[in-house]
Amino acid sequence: MGYRHLRDIKGIHVSALLNRVHLRVALGGLFILVQSIAQAEDWTGWRGPNRSDISSESSRWDEGAWESLEVAWTMQVGEGSSSPVVADGKLYVMGWSDERETVTCAEAATGKTLREHSYPAPRYGRKANGDEGLYSGPTSTPELDAQTGLLYTLGCDGELRCWNTRQGGAKVWAKNLYEEYDIPQRPKVGRSGLRDYGFTSSPLIFGDVLIVEVGAKTGTLIAFDKKTGGEVWRSQATDPPGHTGGPVPFNVDGVPCVAVHSFAGLLVARLDKGHEGETVCLVPWITDFANNVATPAAWKNNVIATSSYNQHRIARYEISLTGGAKQIWEREEASKVCSPIVHDGHVYWAWRMVHCLDVETGKTVWDGGPLGDPGSLILTADDRLILWANRGDLRVIETAVRSPQEYTQLFEKKNIAHKDAWPHVVLSDHRLFCKDRSGYVVCFELKGK
């Protein structure tokens, strides 16, 4: 019998009652859908959307996603330490093979290649020197503009390109930074050997411009119109580039700024209109082999910088527009490669082991879990750390919020990769994308119960 034939029950018509039930069910389903969408996050550039390595997604450890972790798919994209980016269900990644750099677009869920665009490129930058056995191909990570669908890539030989992902990956503009700016080889540092790995820094979108650590004689940082590639401004600082992962945006006294670890040191420059590129501070910090590799971590008005070799330290600086940089603390701890994460009163990084410091004092909270040089971390919304390191070691670790006294490891899976895990691990839409420097990419789907 249909409900429309039933009588009123205590003054409430059954059809109206059921309509309300249907509405509540529909709204409940909508809430679940919206919640699911809100928890899924695009990973559009180096170290994620905020260049912080902090994800809005859960590790799904409590949902049992790691109990029977299985490979969803794998692919080979060519040599390079460039990291993947993911947006709108698509993965974008760079690689080198057969004297060409290739930008690949694939389905994030299946790994199926949708399209590839390639151009002639050397295996190393034209002025490269040293450590050829440790790296090859592109190191810079692509940057995707969610507003326009434009994707920016930078090859090791200075080939800066813009692609339109909404028009089949059509090339919008291109320029070679070596040729346009006559970039010199990085200087030799002290008694260390000369090192030059070509262009390593990942471009940064800020408003209508693309900021690149060019390292030109006329500007360490150069901003290009993101739609045309035309130069918009140059930084006052004119130091050579470091070998860092990329510039980081943050606010100083309410003013937008950018921090980058250039060859000469920790550079902070203004981004506000009329003051673009003006130097706020340059903290002297020259590392052997020009290896200021770890990206600075920005936190409030502060920047945390680190490098190894002759420096072997990590330091916190409070930045102000009028006073420049004031050192708050310094420790004889270091990261050679992994960029620090600042979250909830703590600083984390992974080099030789996983480290946790108190951000206010710099004192060690805990450390543990032996490692080599390669390693990257993501901090998830449920206060876990996901580590990708060595030759493909994957770990889940409790943050100090969950384990304040000691290093606590929940999960480890070893030897997933073929070579060094220099590329950064990526978490997007409950999928984990892990890549090594040979171009081997493996995807794990974090399926909760």
Image: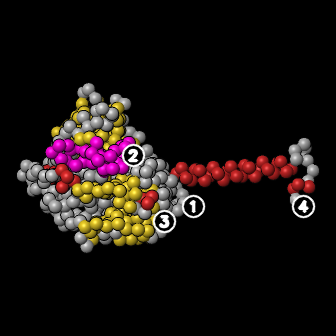
Q: In front here: 80 or 416?
A: 80
Q: Which of 363/89 is in front?
A: 89
| Distance Cα–Cα, label 3 vs label 4 | 45 Å
Q: What amino acid is at disc 1?
A: Lys
Are dots 3 and 2 in contact, CB under 8 Å?
no
Q: Earlier in the sequence, mark 3 or mark 1?
A: 3
What secondary structure is the stretch in magenta mostly built from?
strand
Q: Quadrant of residue 43?
A: bottom left
Q: Is 231 a magenta residue? A: yes
User: Which of pointers 1 and 2 lies earlier in the amino acid sequence?
Assistant: 2
Q: Which residue is mark 4?
A: 1
Q: Are marks 1 and 2 in contact (CB under 8 Å)?
A: no
Q: Nearer the viewer, mark 3 or mark 1?
A: 3
Q: Secondary structure at mark 3?
A: loop
Kindly identify which residue carries mark 2.
50
Q: CA distance from mark 2 to mark 4?
A: 57 Å
Name the image colouring: secondary structure
Mark 3 vs 4, N-terminal side = 4
Label 1 sits on a secondary structure element that is: loop
| Quadrant for the N terminus in the image | bottom right
Packing grade of label 1 (10 A; few <14, some 14-19, many >=20) is few
- In the picture of the structure, the residue carrying the numbered disc 3 is 109
Q: Quadrant of the C terminus?
A: bottom right
Start-end of magenta stretch: 203-232
Tag 3: amino acid? Ala
| Residue situated furthest top in the rendering | 322
